[in-house]
Amino acid sequence: MRKTILLLFTMFLLLSCGGKRDDNRVITVTIEPLRYFAEQLVGDRAEVTTLVPKGSSPETYEPTAQQMVALGNSMMFIKVGDLGFERTWVAKLGDLADGIEIVDTSEGIATVESTSRGVTDQHTWMSCANALVIVKNIYNSLRKADPMNASFYEGRYNALVAKIEKLNAELTESLNTVEGSSFIIYHPALTYFAKEYGLHQLAVEEDGREPSAASLAKVIDEAKAEGVRLMLVQQEFDRRNAEIVAKALNIGMTTINPLSYEWEKEMRDIGRIIASQGSEKGRE
């Protein structure tokens, strides 16, 4: 609490002394995949900066005072929707962000639960169908905020939509051969991806917490029953429990990065990995 108060006080002093930039051509996003979408749309019309740095979890990251001041000086803030980081810090920004256009990119997306305990998966960007909604939300906000460049944004939006649709066609074709297969993942980041391509995701992590011994045993039994041959892990999470599961299943671990700036490449890579190492169930 004391750390938060100090940070907000520092932000107030910096904004009071410096004021807002005159050009105000900066867009701030929460995570790197959103920077990819935003930059595809804005080109050289604005600078796009990311709050959560590489290797950090958007669920627990705490921004610096300088980052929050930069956010307060932005023309637009683009967020995923309801990540832990966003819930905490957007509310605390309060009056310091007065006048900033806040874009909720998940607006219009039907959320999906990532576990049987009713926890909603916030990784909405890990889906081509959702990506089309995300870029449409950003595009509409850009047209509203900067109508002078509306035709410029429209051309880039149409090009990006075509790119996403092409990627979806490729993934649909490659994953068709393993439809119905299962994979195991440490943090359940591929709920939307799995649903989109007829796959089953088993998660080690429990609602953002370390799994209990009983939970580990349960997920191992489920993975064995479904013939899982692939385990995915993310670089920003501790691997100890993932290693226990991988050893019990006698399979290796493959690292993925759903937070990568190279969204299109990451989606394609994940599809390739799953297509080449689908579970025995998916190959029956």
Image (cartoon, grey):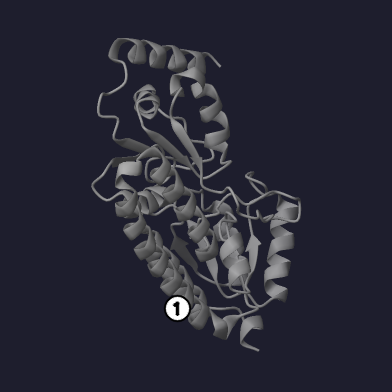
Tell me where residue 49 appears, x and y as whole percent: 33, 39
What residue do we see at 69% from left, 73% from top? 224
The residue positioned 62% from the left and 45% from the top of the image is: 208
For residue 181, which quarter of the picture?
A: bottom right
Farthest-out residue, bottom? 284
Q: Of residues 209 and 260, which is closer to you in this image?
A: 260
Find numbered disc 1 in the image and state the secondary structure of the residue it sits on: helix
Tag count: 1
Where 57 falls versus 167 (above or below)?
above
- Residue 58, relative to residue 183: is it above or below? above
What type is the residue that disc 1 sits on?
Glu
- Quarter of the picture holding the N terminus: top right
Residues 52 and 76: in front is 76
Which residue is tagged 1? 170
Drawn side of residue 234 relative to residue 244, left or right? left
Residue 156 seen by the camera: yes
| Picture residue at 38% right of the left edge, 63% below the top | 158
Instruction: Tell me the quadrant of the picture where the C terminus can be found.
Output: bottom right
Q: In this view, does 62 lie above or below 137?
A: above
Rendered view: 244 above or below 210: below
Residue 269 appears in view: no
Residue 90 percent coordinates (x, y): 52, 29
Question: For the residue carrying disc 1, how many other residues have a C-alpha within 10 Å: few (<14), some (14-19), or many (20+)?
Answer: few
The quadrant where residue 46 appears: top left
Who's the residue at 63% across and 74% down the image? 198
Image location (x, y in percent) of residue 225? 72, 75
Q: Could you tell me residue 34's position as x and y percent?
A: 42, 49
Between 132 and 226, the residue placed more toward the observer is 132
